[in-house]
Structure formats: structure tokens, C-alpha cells
Amino acid sequence: MKAKLIRHEKVTDELGNTIEIKAWKLPEPTEDKPHGYKYSLVYIVDDSRIIGYDNAEGKGDHKHIRERAEPYDFISL
């Protein structure tokens, strides 16, 4: 069984900036996704990611602030 998409929203604001949210429920937790979710949240200005949160394969929960990436404690969706 594969992950089930539970939320996908993409919005462009009045300035042309993009906010996109994607979240999937995994069939079971994994080592790098112990909470059982795969997700990506991003805010883009002029085609550049300004802020992002995700848990890409093998990287665990982490956030991006411009060019910097660092881990953070996932609490809930």
C-alpha cells in the first residue's frame, strides 16, 4: 500500500508569491518518518524558496530558510 495524499493546496497571493502544502499519510511509520507522514510546505517568492518544511527521503524533518537547512522537531500536522 502506498502513501495516501491527505492535503494539497497551492495558492498564489496578490503579489505572485506561491504557498504550497502537500501531506501524505504513510501506511506505517518508517525510520525517517516515525510520525507516519510525508510532507512538504513551501513559500516561494520570485521563483526562490524563502521558507520550506519537509521530510525528504532519508533526511528526516527539516526546515529551509533561504539557502540554510536544519533539523527541527515535528510536533503535528
Image (cartoon, rainbow, N blue to C red):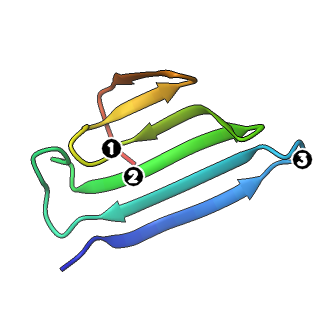
- Which residue, given by chain and number where applicable, does mark 3 sit on? 14
Residue 36 vs residue 54: left or right? left
Q: How far apart are marks 3 and 1 (CA)?
A: 29 Å
Density class for disc 3 (Cα within 10 Å; few <14, some 14-19, many ≥20) is few
Which tag, 3 or 2, sits closer to the chain's start?
3
The disc at residue 77 is none
Q: What element carries label 1?
A: loop
Mark 2 touches mark 1? (CB < 8 Å): yes
- Which residue, given by chain and number where applicable, does mark 1 sit on? 55
Q: Residue at x 57, y 31 (%)?
A: 51
Density class for disc 1 (Cα within 10 Å; few <14, some 14-19, many ≥20) is some
| Near-viewer residue (47 or 26) | 47
* Residue 11, above or below 61: below
Residue 15 vs residue 28: left or right? right
Which tag, 3 or 1, sits closer to the chain's start?
3
Density class for disc 2 (Cα within 10 Å; few <14, some 14-19, many ≥20) is many
Q: Quadrant of the N terminus?
A: bottom left
Q: What residue type is labelled 2?
A: Tyr
Residue 5: x and y in percent read 40, 71
* Residue 77, above or below 44: below
Q: Residue at x 57, y 43 (%)?
A: 42
Residue 37 vs residue 18: left or right? left
Residue 52: x and y in percent read 52, 36
Residue 53: x and y in percent read 45, 38
The disc at residue 39 is 2
What is the residue that sits farthest to the bottom in this orientation?
1
Q: Distance between the residues labelled 2 and 1?
A: 6 Å
Q: Residue at x 32, y 55 (%)?
A: 38
Dividing the picture into quadrants, the one containing residue 27 is bottom left
Q: What element carries label 3?
A: loop
Which tag, 2 or 1, sits closer to the chain's start?
2
Q: Which amino acid does label 3 sit on?
A: Glu
